[in-house]
Image: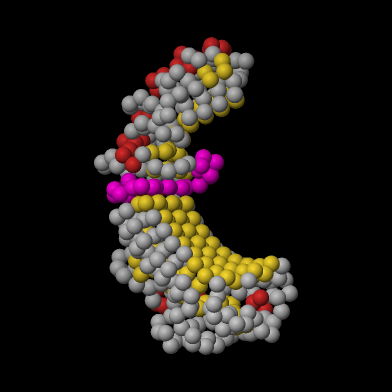
Amino acid sequence: MKALQVLYLESVSFSPIGFHSLPNLKTLYCVDCELENFSLSLKNMRSLEILALIGTKIDEISEELVKFSTLKYLRLSGVGVEEEMNIPPNLVSRLTSLQELHVVSKSNINLLELNSLSRLTALSVILSTNQISQEYFVFPKLQRYAIVVDDCYTYLKAQTLKTVTIANFSSSLTAFNNLFCNVKKLKLRNVSGQKNIVPSIGKTGVNELTSLKLASCKDMEFLIDITSDQGPTVVFSNLVKLNIHNMVSWKGLCYGLSRSHRAIASLTRLRVVRIGSCHQLKTIFSPCVAQSMLYIEKLFIFQCDGVEQVIGFAQEDEIPENYYWPKLKTLRIMDCPIFSCFIVQARLLEGLVISNVGIIWKTYVPVLNEDCIVVENHEEVFQVQGGYSFSRIKELDLKNLFEVRIIWNDFVLSALRVLTI
């Protein structure tokens, strides 16, 4: 047994008195165990490089860890019997060889101690708002991280992604500056004091971000504000998923955007957009943003009392342009009482739900190009030329469209499987 280097234990209860016979042990992984006299056993594991205690009851997180000069990886999750893990003061700062630290339960960890870990490359931690508000603290630059402030944590996802989740927070976000540069998944819930993401939070454009969730951030009005010439020239270049919900001040994606700014905020990789309960919002996409969204696959708009258009146009009497979204498969517009009209070319469209939408203008909207659909609450709900846009429709759901007299004319829904009227 003296040659043993890796030991994995699961759902066992024992006293590790035999650890003295494992002088070469480098990895100890305990899941849902109960270890007696664990502090004493640490004295016999001086070669340990990886220590993971997950859902494991021990007597205490011991100062003996400091003597592990080779410890590179430490994971503590649900350790001990208390609701909050008690980490002795100045313990973390003395683990100078540590490269990965994962404290994925509530704890009293002092973040300022991270400044002493010059080799740290990966960090997972659950924090309270009081812990993150420590003056002068800034997270170090990291290769991998999952930072959760006052919210839930999913460890498996955190192992491979750069994620930041912040909830119920009203202080400055400067502590996260080094993380916002390369964050891939960002979730903000009930975060106040921020008017936008770029440039207020992501001064460099958050161009590695792939997923963004915003909810109940009462002060936020726009995703991007490009009225200042000091901002980045490329933003959100890799954003794939956008979820915006219950934003009382939300007015739109981009402020100050014109056709000359198309390259600045193109959102060209956006595939899934969900926007709900944003009652100040009138238009989802500006024309120049809509033109570049060639990868959009799913669009959900719901419970937005002020939304009039999916794609905006300047004047009421202006004929809106026809936009080509070749990958759009699902379109749902629900409970938007003054929504008027949406024109798009979408040959792959498979699911269409229009429910509880209103009408604010009855001007006839011509079909501008072959293979486009006009979705509106008019006498004829769809104007279709060529019929190709509906050739793949599998689900069609229409509710509370009180102006409708004709659903479709002169085209065949050959793939239709579900029709709800």
Q: Residue at x 45, y 55 (%)?
A: 213
Up-down: is 114 above or below 175? Answer: above
Closer to the camera in the image, 50 or 354: 354
Closer to the camera in the image, 361 or 237: 361
* Quadrant of the snapshot with the C terminus: bottom right
The x and y percentages for residue 86 are 38, 26
The x and y percentages for residue 206 are 42, 57
Closer to the camera in the image, 230 or 32: 32
The x and y percentages for residue 187 are 43, 51
Up-down: is 391 above or below 92? Answer: below
The region drawn magenta spans 154-175
Per the image, is 18 magenta? no
The x and y percentages for residue 63 are 39, 20
* Quadrant of the snapshot with the N terminus: top right
Q: Residue at x 70, y 76 (%)?
A: 413
Colouring convention used in this rendered image of the protein:
secondary structure
Closer to the camera in the image, 226 or 244: 244
Q: Give the quarter of the image for residue 227.
A: bottom left
Q: Residue at x 43, y 32 (%)?
A: 98
Q: Is residue 11 visible?
A: yes
Up-down: is 174 above or below 48? Answer: below
